[in-house]
Image (cartoon, coloured by chain):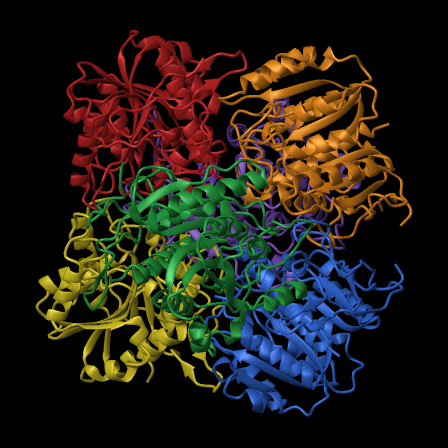
Chain colours: A yellow, B blue, C purple, D orange, E green, F red
Amino acid sequence: MAEGSVLSASPPHLPYSGIATFARAPIVQPDGDWRADVGVLGIPFDIALGFRPGARYAPRELREASLRYVPPFTDLAGRTRMANVTLADAGDVVLPSLEPELARERITRAARQVKARCRIPVFLGGDHSVTYPLLRAFHDIPELHVIQLDAHLDFTDTRNDTRYSNSSPFRRAAEDLPNLIHVTTLGLRGLRHDPEAVAAARERGHTLVPMEDVEARFDEVMTALPPGRPVYLSVDADALDPAVLPGTSSPEPDGFSYALALRVIRAVVRRHQLLALDLVELAPNLDPTGRSALIGARLIMETLCEALDD
Amino acid sequence: MAEGSVLSASPPHLPYSGIATFARAPIVQPDGDWRADVGVLGIPFDIALGFRPGARYAPRELREASLRYVPPFTDLAGRTRMANVTLADAGDVVLPSLEPELARERITRAARQVKARCRIPVFLGGDHSVTYPLLRAFHDIPELHVIQLDAHLDFTDTRNDTRYSNSSPFRRAAEDLPNLIHVTTLGLRGLRHDPEAVAAARERGHTLVPMEDVEARFDEVMTALPPGRPVYLSVDADALDPAVLPGTSSPEPDGFSYALALRVIRAVVRRHQLLALDLVELAPNLDPTGRSALIGARLIMETLCEALDD
Amino acid sequence: MAEGSVLSASPPHLPYSGIATFARAPIVQPDGDWRADVGVLGIPFDIALGFRPGARYAPRELREASLRYVPPFTDLAGRTRMANVTLADAGDVVLPSLEPELARERITRAARQVKARCRIPVFLGGDHSVTYPLLRAFHDIPELHVIQLDAHLDFTDTRNDTRYSNSSPFRRAAEDLPNLIHVTTLGLRGLRHDPEAVAAARERGHTLVPMEDVEARFDEVMTALPPGRPVYLSVDADALDPAVLPGTSSPEPDGFSYALALRVIRAVVRRHQLLALDLVELAPNLDPTGRSALIGARLIMETLCEALDD
Amino acid sequence: MAEGSVLSASPPHLPYSGIATFARAPIVQPDGDWRADVGVLGIPFDIALGFRPGARYAPRELREASLRYVPPFTDLAGRTRMANVTLADAGDVVLPSLEPELARERITRAARQVKARCRIPVFLGGDHSVTYPLLRAFHDIPELHVIQLDAHLDFTDTRNDTRYSNSSPFRRAAEDLPNLIHVTTLGLRGLRHDPEAVAAARERGHTLVPMEDVEARFDEVMTALPPGRPVYLSVDADALDPAVLPGTSSPEPDGFSYALALRVIRAVVRRHQLLALDLVELAPNLDPTGRSALIGARLIMETLCEALDD
Amino acid sequence: MAEGSVLSASPPHLPYSGIATFARAPIVQPDGDWRADVGVLGIPFDIALGFRPGARYAPRELREASLRYVPPFTDLAGRTRMANVTLADAGDVVLPSLEPELARERITRAARQVKARCRIPVFLGGDHSVTYPLLRAFHDIPELHVIQLDAHLDFTDTRNDTRYSNSSPFRRAAEDLPNLIHVTTLGLRGLRHDPEAVAAARERGHTLVPMEDVEARFDEVMTALPPGRPVYLSVDADALDPAVLPGTSSPEPDGFSYALALRVIRAVVRRHQLLALDLVELAPNLDPTGRSALIGARLIMETLCEALDD
Amino acid sequence: MAEGSVLSASPPHLPYSGIATFARAPIVQPDGDWRADVGVLGIPFDIALGFRPGARYAPRELREASLRYVPPFTDLAGRTRMANVTLADAGDVVLPSLEPELARERITRAARQVKARCRIPVFLGGDHSVTYPLLRAFHDIPELHVIQLDAHLDFTDTRNDTRYSNSSPFRRAAEDLPNLIHVTTLGLRGLRHDPEAVAAARERGHTLVPMEDVEARFDEVMTALPPGRPVYLSVDADALDPAVLPGTSSPEPDGFSYALALRVIRAVVRRHQLLALDLVELAPNLDPTGRSALIGARLIMETLCEALDD
């Protein structure tokens, strides 16, 4: 296929039926000859987390869940969204077993290929360690901002003898990418924060927003960044309250409601230029009710609706 | 048995013990010789839904869950409720495999029989398609109102080549029942609404309340209907937030809290004449924690407490 | 794509990774311009069964499980099989909600299209009712034989008021297809057999082999049919012992071991001309260990190895 | 209802539908005015086991599973069984929380009542401790034999400071019931046997058959007892191989196949006079595939077919 | 080991690794020669509850979950807590099978031993019945207060023929312990309250706070008790909203959010002298997502942080 | 503790109670001052497998399961085994996140330490990749034999771009350890064998026994090795039939029954000198019935009974 095609208006398949590509998008190769508004890439890599595995299953489950949310969408007011948006599904990065460095190289390469072919890449993790190689694909953005929804800072230098775990992606990215000038982290909570990581993030001028302050400081935080900035949005599934989204390795109570997460994302996307979105740390195997993947897929769609709304 | 007997004041069985009828009510035949305040009828029919089956298990699981909520009830203030209420359990409609039209006929017939023998029938679905044949049993009510708690409008003309799916019950009922003069739908949300269905509902003057407006417009919506109207109350399990009630085919985040659902139901029941209650789209197989059926059963009991309070 | 391509010799993806087509086969349309040795078609239809739903999930889960069994295969003796076999995945039949007759028409049509484009179609059910419309696609075979592995006869005239349930596919096929001259059913067991169905099958000269006789009568049964006959092979997941394959609606103890099922299939395929294979009644949602889908996918592959061996 | 009615020949309900009594038998009170061939009594008591609870759920789940096995049954040879058998479901013993002695008294009383009203009582445990109070209901049989299928001897004097656990039912019964003259235990296996219990059982002349000897010594063991003896049959779910029946507190590998268990039961029932049957230690909550309850229910039905065959 | 050692600052094990003691604390015998700030004791007893068992698994699962929360903790502001706190894990009370009175004796004895060796004992239930024998270990406190977070009053005299179920711990304690002068119960809700128990509690002057009043009456309730009182804090898992913590026998909707539970606990601990904490009725087997145990363990840690903060 | 103590004859804890060390053995440090007959070491490492993770949970679950099998054991014949055997539990290797080479170093070091302090080390994997670093601890055995029960050969040079996956442990060991002179692999089956690996193993003279030949060639294979050889026994959970042991990443049907596995192990252990035992690839998270860990723990115990029998 030469190009991400416009989706047919009435996809006939029931959600449990048909080969599952993201929202019924055509399949493309990351380095193929295609162009689309949105390019989806899966990164089924979860060997860098330190607790409960399962994020490797997320790309496939998010594709399946997305079949309940195939655009276009019409709201109660009759407004139709994503009617003319093209999507393409670039499949998953072909990852090695076990070889973390090789894995990171391949992730960066595939992300670059997808990024070059679409307006907004959507990356389906994987654990949060994949955000480091993903961000490397954005080394060419003059001033790169990250907005991160997360219970944890993930700016730790070393954890359990590794520098590349899911606790460190932004630290490694900050070291490697001079253009990564700022990270805003919203939703921090939990008993233990790595003091060195907190200090290092603050020294770089990062914005750290504890969960309990997100609502109160909403306008302040959302307007702290000058408008129009290129923003990479990284959503860790554990940002959400585990009552809402229990399928994640390291749940922490008192997180984002779905509505608040959406409010943050919409504010970011409206004000800035969305470079890319990743959704990481979703472990569908830990949620037998299936709602974690459904909610994850819907959050992605809502983000795209907002970002691609004209 | 000739009559729904008053429940014994202290049922001796532990909830996991004994043959499970609804709240230990005596078993009756839908067309038998009995009278009761409340008649319970199960409709284990779920072949009309388009996603995850399991609502066929709901009548049995709701009966089992109801054993934690056997009346009478005394609240902290010492007020006793449902002390003199009679209940009867009319079992499940005997349904065919696969033959949808025959199934609908039987549902309507059994519903009529139960309706003729009690003050308030309680219908245990089944997917939401069963509300259409259930409503047909109320063709003799001069001015029939429906109040529907639901994430979805379910007023679609045709979906996936059928006019009888769980997306269409109110459309079919509106076509068939001239006496069905109004539907109030509370809790609408989700990415996609069928524009034709929304327009058709609005043209009929239905009241459509998005989830995010339920609290703000509570008094307005609750008093829009003149008091004392006969109301059929239809509760779709997906009206509730999936964090509260995850066992449903098509969960949508940001739904009713239990308290808000109860507040709506109480307001409706106090102001109007409750003709019947259905609880549909509960899929207990999708919730291994068991709380979905427990909460569904309790919601039914709370509704009855309110409706039968003297 | 114009043609089912030869599979690459070393598929790089790990089984949990990549978009899941059957054994990484290219995606085709049932009525597209392609040719392949094997064409795979899913039929996610399970509303005709009378007990526990879930077979609708089987096509997708079998595709995912097949990723552990991507040809070519080399055995311990160094013999390589399916090295030059082409596979194509024709996706799932686009099924309506609820409309059984329309569903059957579409199944027959899609099966005919796939059959016309490959040597051996593989049909992924669905409950066993789908075998009736599938067999209709073989109305043009002069003398059609069916070999059925099944705990149940599935030759019942009417069950629970329907003639089209998963208890009746071979009865309906026998009525409709004059060319369907014989059915051999192996693995019959359970407490209750429909006497009318047994008598009707025997009157037609069908061969009924109880499970306990399969091994003892193996050679007799396997040579009863003259060699070289065109055979449609229908494997009901409940033929297998539920200890081996628990994910099925209506398990019956004391069924086929995997080895015995394979022995039967190999004997059939070597002696006769395999027209098509279906695997039905697999309900992966009923087996949280995941082995039911894995074993189902492997059984399909073993059958193909045998049938396509040169 | 005055009497256990003959079952209707064609029960219309699908198995997941209708209020679940055992095989759709009418509900009776243990001490009511009824007579039936078979009387079913549940004992949802599992606080005497020392490992994984859940047997309290077995009576209800066995009733639900029995709905797949509603008599009469016709086999492939056209022979119909249980056509004229009457069944009655006496519900569950009303048990206290926690008070073991009171629980045992009530179990014995209800068992006596059921025994007085039917030819063959079927007792649905509960853990194996309930067999002691059940056996007390048979104090009036002049020479009482027990045949026990079990991985464990359950003849321990004291375990973890109690004399009434599920390891001791036959020890307590032997002490209390002078008429209990012999126990045959088949299927013994596992790493550890209580030496004192083994010695005590042997001193009383009990027959202890290790699992690995059951087939080899089949005829010897089955004919050791003079024919026509009154036999209480006690089937512990862990007698069966956990691959066949995983839902049990203390599974031990290498147990009875379903076929061998059935062979033993048939031999016993044909040769002797079946006084009663209990099925204990089934923990349906430990088997999400649901097959444990289905197999348990079917085993009961097969036993009744054999015992009531004329 | 002679003494609860100070925890090493950087425990090297990943949470799923290593032998699980509470927060990696050293193992001690309840009556051994040790001293620590915190002594942990498990009481895996759940035969006194009347619904769904599983609390017997809570001590082990809470220990495993605690490994994500090993002190010391540093918050975002850089404040470090529990840096110099010593913990000791006294294992589980050695309980008999089935013998409730003996069980209660052993629980009281072990609790006394732990209490004598640490500043704050932490008791891991078990169902709520264990709080009665636990409170007996505090018979020597001149004026003992209990603060209870619970959906249910648990002050019932007799339920289902026993006086020792999980509905009665505070009634029995009030009878036995003259020094137990007051109970504050927060979070009461549900359909049915035992009128006799409510009256008896009120007659004794207990404070009963319905869930819906907790926030509104927060300051009033929290300051009702004169400051500095010795308080035994008893947290029933069902106090929390089942969306937050679904793993409990008897969930009731509309409970404590995690934040509100923490707010209450912090207020109590800051104002009074925390004698001990118990967490009961956690049934991890009822929550396959694992978050119930994780949240329970974190709640304990937060309580200790607050209580041991200097 | 200075020494692995003799186990007390009657451990009082119920299996679900108490801190779980292997068979209630005392906890030791791998490099501590202790001696025991058996030293247990866990290796919770599963990032080298290519399919379904979960073996990281096996050491902890095997310890819990072992509590049902605490020695000494008495068989039906009155023979007592392991009465005077000392066990010590050395906990788990402290593993890094993600750094495979460092992980392998630590595994080898800890294995050497344990090996130096006991007669028979028992290693609890982890995926099968850990057997390579474990075998390195036996570099000092002049002529090292491995007997491997496994569905797969695990002698692949490179898979998915890594040389250290769970497909390669014996290849790497063979390269590194000149003293590793022979591997016997029993139970090989499945569709695909790596031809290069098969050839390489055969060239080294390894013995490859397909599953279907194990019984027929039992005596031949068991006596092929001269008696008295030092043997490292490596048991992959997928050697067993998945009906018996479903909790494993890559199940293959038609595997070892428990009895046959035990027969092989006993024959090996009686004839040779058991150097060590590992049990790998057990994924307890994939088996909600819990029997996989129970059977794994029992298999270990049976092996020790045989090896330590005097």
Q: In the picture provided, is F223 more to the left or to the right than D277?
A: left
**Image quadrant where residue E308 sits:** bottom left
Residue A303 location in percent, x, y?
A: 34, 74
Residue D206 on image: x %, y % = 67, 15
Q: Is residue C41 visible?
A: no
Q: In the picture provided, is D180 more to the left or to the right than E131? A: right
Where is residue F14? Give x, y as percent: 49, 34
Q: Quadrant of the N terminus of chain E?
A: top left
Residue C287 seen in the figure: yes
Residue found at x 76% / y 33% = D75
- The quarter holding residue C85 reads top left
Q: Residue at x 48, y 46 (%)?
A: C288
Q: How many marks?
A: 0
Q: Quadrant of the C terminus of chain E?
A: bottom left
Q: Is residue B288 above or below residue C148?
A: below
| Residue at position x 60%, y 60% in the image | B293
Q: Nearer the viewer, residue E87 or F236?
A: E87
In the rendered view, tell whether residue E254 sits above or below residue A219.
Answer: above
Q: Position of residue B117 (x, y in %)?
A: 84, 70
Q: Nearer the viewer, residue B37 or E84?
A: E84
Quick one: C9 or C299, which is closer to the camera? C299
In-image side of F190 versus F91 (left or right): right
In this rendered view, identify the residue nearer to me: E105 or E93.
Answer: E105
Residue B293 higher or lower than B197, as above or below = above
Residue projecting furthest to the left? A178
